[in-house]
DNA sequence: CGGCATTTTGAAATACATCAATATTAGTGG
DNA sequence: CCACTAATATTGATGTATTTCAAAATGCCG
């Protein structure tokens, strides 16, 4: 919640916190020059959230962008009808918030314990305008997200229940911190939420999970802790690759 | 196919063709200043395509952006498995092509007779870099497309066959040239393509269309010419608004 | 330990898919 | 213009995956 003091490392413009940040190596920050990071750094705030804590609220103008440093965030939206719809998950390295979107189109909340890097819109937008390269980066960011969303449509449109569930587990596993490398993780969503996300019922999710366990693709302990026995077989079950 | 000669109108920097263009009033071009349009204009090429003609080929680096001036374009992609998937439709005013996407992620072809405004990437990219405002416009463009794609995911995830078909007809109707204002249009997709798009079979599409006709929401002549009897009832059938 | 939400499991209902046959349309050449 | 063909669309009968309804089991928290 509190801002960490800024301290520049001797002989290097790169701020200490950013240099130690796991995100420095990949994604958005990796493409920023030390000078750009240095300019941004004074405005960065590190936050740690507990499951259920709100990050972004749908329909509210949001003054910040966020970078997920660790943990998993859940994206959801309430439709006109009042029904809730899960829109996706965001993992370490993912960016939250759209430029030029006046108000948030969805709600984001911590699904697990989450560490965030909070960036004021004004700061990043100013940098983007001053430095074309950063503006392009943010633009790329959206293009990539669009691609991913399109891929998701395809995935859901012509796949059956087993493939959808296997596909979701596969996607979650791939994005786990590399040490565990997909082997073991806590499900960031309840069965009901998974069903909502995949367009299936709670019961179907439950049945498919037990089926996947019965077939030896995964193991489940304490309802939420999944161990993937075989990533390749899981991918096959998901209908990924030909 | 051939470039139209450029001719500036007296006392106005706005090129004649652009001024007469139906797109001038809305969308991307509406946000460009006369000076910006004038700069872009020499590079614009008007093309007229017949149904089935390719506009963009998946996997190929594309040297142009396109604006749909009239008609309907069909977007599709071939997945790893070799199966084809319809990704969507583009109507008059819609933009084709993503900045920073090195190669086309999908194929676009004319579904009806289509009029296009073809813009070299180099020209528009240069303008975008020279003039922040234009860069922002292209950025906004993607953000809007992302929003729309997300909405589509929602639509398909938790709706049954009738709702999906009604929803598609509603979306097509809304985007028809205003004179006809949704009343009557030719379906730009075959039953098989609609099924592919909506994740349903040809037979189901056919049955749902006859059901909608039987219920008096639409009329169909010559298989492809749809008249919407009641847009409000169609929207209700689609599950739009609560 | 007891209450409460979530998950699992079972049985019946249903929406959509599949298989199969017929009907319509568009295209082609006589 | 008509007959012929091929492609696309419709309609029917049956099968199946998923939903729905209902109940039991598990895990969670005071």
Image: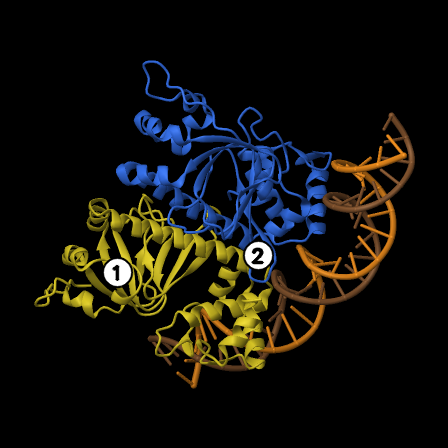
Chain colours: A yellow, B blue, C orange, D brown
What quarter of the picture does the C terminus of chain A occupy? bottom right
Is residue B186 toward the left or the right of residue B222 in the image? left
Give neighbour class at mark 2: few <14, some 14-19, many 20+ (Cα, 10 Å). Answer: many
Q: Is residue A206 visible?
A: no
**Among the 4 quarters of the image, the one containing residue B113:** top right
Q: Is residue B129 left or right of residue B3?
A: left
Q: Is residue A230 above or below residue A63?
A: below
Instruction: Identify the residue at image location x=58%, y=80%.
Output: A215
Please state the chain letter of the residue tagged with numbered disc 2 in the rendered image: A
Residue B80, x across and y down, in percent: 55, 61
Q: Which residue is mark 2?
A: A157
Q: Nearer the viewer, residue D30 or B86?
A: B86
The reply to whether residue A221 is in sight is yes
Mark 1, other Cα within 10 Å: few <14 / some 14–19 / many ≥20? some
Q: Which mark is residue A29?
A: 1
What is the secondary structure assignment of the residue under circle 1?
A: helix
Mark 1 → mark 2, Cα distance in angstroms: 34 Å
Front-most of residues B241 and A227 = A227
For the N terminus of chain A, which image quadrant? bottom left
Q: Residue at x 17, y 60 (%)?
A: A34
- Give the camera-side residue of B75 and D26: B75
In terms of secondary structure, where does tag 2 sit? helix
Q: Is residue A106 above or below residue B127?
A: below
Q: Nearer the viewer, mark 1 or mark 2?
A: 1
Find residue B48 and report its horizontal and vertical position in percent.
55, 31
Subunit that carries the residue with mark 1: A
């Amino acid at each position: 919640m509190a801002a960490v003091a800024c301290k520049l490392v001797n002989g290097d413009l790169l701020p200490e916190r950013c240099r130690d940040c796991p995100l420095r190596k990949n994604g958005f920050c990796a493409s920023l020059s030390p000078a750009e990071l240095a300019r941004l750094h004074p405005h960065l705030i590190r936050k740690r959230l507990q499951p259920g804590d709100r990050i972004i609220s749908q329909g509210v103008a949001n003054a910040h962008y966020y970078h997920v440093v660790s943990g998993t965030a859940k994206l959801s939206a309430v439709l006109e009808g009042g029904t809730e719809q899960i829109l996706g998950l965001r993992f370490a390295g993912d960016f939250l918030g759209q430029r030029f979107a006046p108000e948030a189109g969805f709600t984001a909340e911590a699904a697990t314990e989450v560490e965030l890097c909070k960036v004021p819109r004004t700061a990043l937008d100013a940098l983007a305008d001053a430095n074309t390269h950063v503006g392009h980066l943010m633009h790329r960011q959206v293009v990539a997200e669009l691609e991913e969303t399109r891929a998701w449509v395809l995935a859901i449109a012509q796949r059956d229940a087993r493939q959808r569930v296997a596909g979701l587990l596969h996607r979650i596993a791939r994005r786990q911190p590399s040490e565990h490398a997909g082997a073991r993780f806590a499900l960031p969503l309840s069965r009901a939420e998974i069903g909502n996300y995949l367009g299936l019922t709670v019961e179907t999710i439950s049945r498919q999970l037990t089926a996947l366990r019965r077939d030896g693709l995964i193991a489940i302990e304490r309802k939420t802790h999944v161990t993937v026995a075989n990533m390749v077989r899981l991918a096959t079950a998901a209908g990924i690759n030909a």
